[in-house]
Image (tube, rainbow, N blue to C red):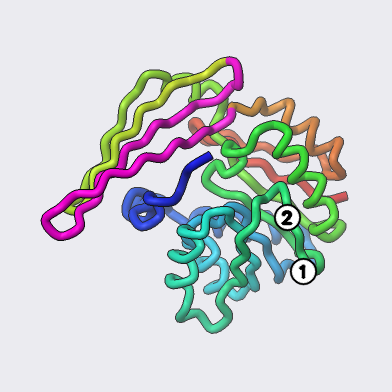
Amino acid sequence: MNCYHSLAAFYDRLTADVDYSDFADRYEEAFRESGGEFHLLLDLCCGTGSLSMEMSKRGYELISVDSSEQMLMEAHEKCQGLPVPPLFLQQDVTELDLYGTVDAAFCSLEGINYLSWSAVSELLRRLKNFIRPGGLFLFDIRSAEYLASLDGDTFVDEDEDFLCLWRADYDGSLPALVYGMDIFSRSGDLWKRSREEHIEYAHGEKQLAALLEGSGFSRPEIVHESDRLFFTARRL
């Protein structure tokens, strides 16, 4: 899948409305309710590192993983001024390999939707080894109904030096929403065109809960907020 290459340089502007402090507050509340020590955290599909930076500022140590070299370059640059910057690793989450365990892992802004069902299963198998017993796995997804509702829609994001056109097509055979994306970026008097394809898989709430339970985690707490579902599961 060719995604988050050309888009990396513009990602933060395209997601300027995301409140990362709200995600951090949610995770810290889960840590308090769970009890125990939460110090070393794993940020899966960390993107440009905005949430890693927020959690680092709150005193946590971060291991931050993403498969996109371009997104990690943006993240590394962003976090240079932190007293203890995150450790950034370029890894596919289905090949996750750490030297030890973490107290909790999180995957935010529907990173799980970018994984096929077999990839989610493999990730959970690996997380069982890398989250300490009693630790937490927290993630959010877009609902299957929401993804299906975007079929045929077109979106435009633009600024003075870039233009991004999104076309969404829902493929029920996968099932997944496929975004064809054309990106135009200004370089002096010229414009450069690039193309990316993004796939967000539709995962069922009950199926994910059952998969977590079958992979060494507790039955998750699930919170519905509009078209987004937040999962919190304990490593048994």
Amino acid type shown at disc 2: Leu
Image x and y of residue 200, in percent? 53, 33
Vertical arrangement, residue 77 with respect to residue 66, above or below: below
Amino acid type shown at disc 1: Glu
Image x and y of residue 136, in percent? 75, 54
The number of numbered discs placed on residues in the rendered structure image is 2
Quarter of the figure with residue 115: top right
| Residue located beneath label 1 in the image | 37
Residue occupying the point 62% across, 64% down: 89
Vertical arrangement, residue 156 with respect to residue 63, above or below: above
Residue 134: mark in rendering: none
Image x and y of residue 204, in percent? 66, 25
Q: CA distance from mark 1 to mark 2?
A: 23 Å
122 left or right of 92 in image: right
Range drawn in magenta: 173-201
Residue closer to the observer: 200 or 33: 200
Helix, strand or loop at disc 1? loop
Residue occupying the point 82% across, 45% down: 125
113 left or right of 80 in image: right
| Residue located beneath label 2 in the image | 96
Mostly what secondary structure, the magenta segment? strand
Furthest residue toward left: 189
| Whether residue 125 is visible | yes
Residue 40 magenta? no
